[in-house]
Amino acid sequence: MFENLDPLLRIFWFVAIPTSLIFLIQTIMTFAGVDATDGLEADFDGELSHGETPFQLFSLRNLINFLLGFSWTGVSFFNTIENKPLLIGLSVLIGSAFVYVFFLIIRQIQKLAEDNSFKLDSTVNKTAEVYLTIPERKSGKGKVMVSVKGTFHELDAMTEYEKIPSHAMVRIVKVLNGNILLVETL
């Protein structure tokens, strides 16, 4: 079947078939949760940073995306475009567009990532409710309830001034020793 084809069309087919199979396997592995970072590192160092989004230009996935667009464009337009250099140029352009579209998709997906880890420093200047009475002038610890990113946290607190009773509202001034909040009454 392939012996009777034009050599350029044969090349497009010989690139399209294995590339499509590899793309299909990559897609299945992606949806199954298996990734190249789980043991096999097939990317080269070619990181292009656009702000916060790292993008590996020279990676196996981008090579497959390029070859997929390149080969199937060549196969699809072989009988339509008679000028072979124009066909190859269009195939390279579409292959590059595949890589660029993949980059845009990954960039949008990475925007969905959100860091919800709790950091004690994020409580500074927030208001909180005293949960357990806070003794005066750093003579002991009490507890406050503070909401950060929609989650309530019970944290140790001290004050530099007079005793603060339970259910009083306070403002968090700073973090002491990395794990105790310094508060003042409102």
Image (cartoon, rainbow, N blue to C red):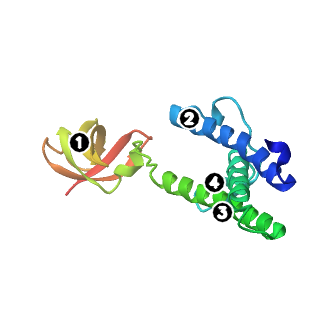
Distance (Cα) linking label 2 and label 3: 22 Å
Q: Which mark is residue 97?
A: 3
Q: Residue at x 67, y 43 (%)?
A: 20
| Sequence-earlier tag: 2 or 3 | 2
Q: Which mark is residue 145?
A: 1
Q: Residue at x 69, y 59 (%)?
A: 73
Q: Which residue is mark 2?
A: 28
| Sequence-earlier tag: 4 or 3 | 4
The percent position of residue 9, horizontal first and vertical second, equals 80, 54
**Residue type at mark 2?**
Ile
Distance (Cα) linking label 4 and label 3: 18 Å
**Viewer-proximal residue among 58 and 26:** 26
Q: Tags 2 and 4 in contact by the CB under 8 Å rule?
A: no
**Residue type at mark 3?**
Ala
| Sequence-earlier tag: 2 or 4 | 2
**Viewer-proximal residue among 184 and 17:** 17
Q: Which residue is mark 4?
A: 54
The percent position of residue 169, horizontal first and vertical second, equals 17, 51
Q: Residue at x 12, y 44 (%)?
A: 167
The percent position of residue 55, horizontal first and vertical second, equals 65, 54
The percent position of residue 56, horizontal first and vertical second, equals 69, 51
**Residue type at mark 4?**
Pro
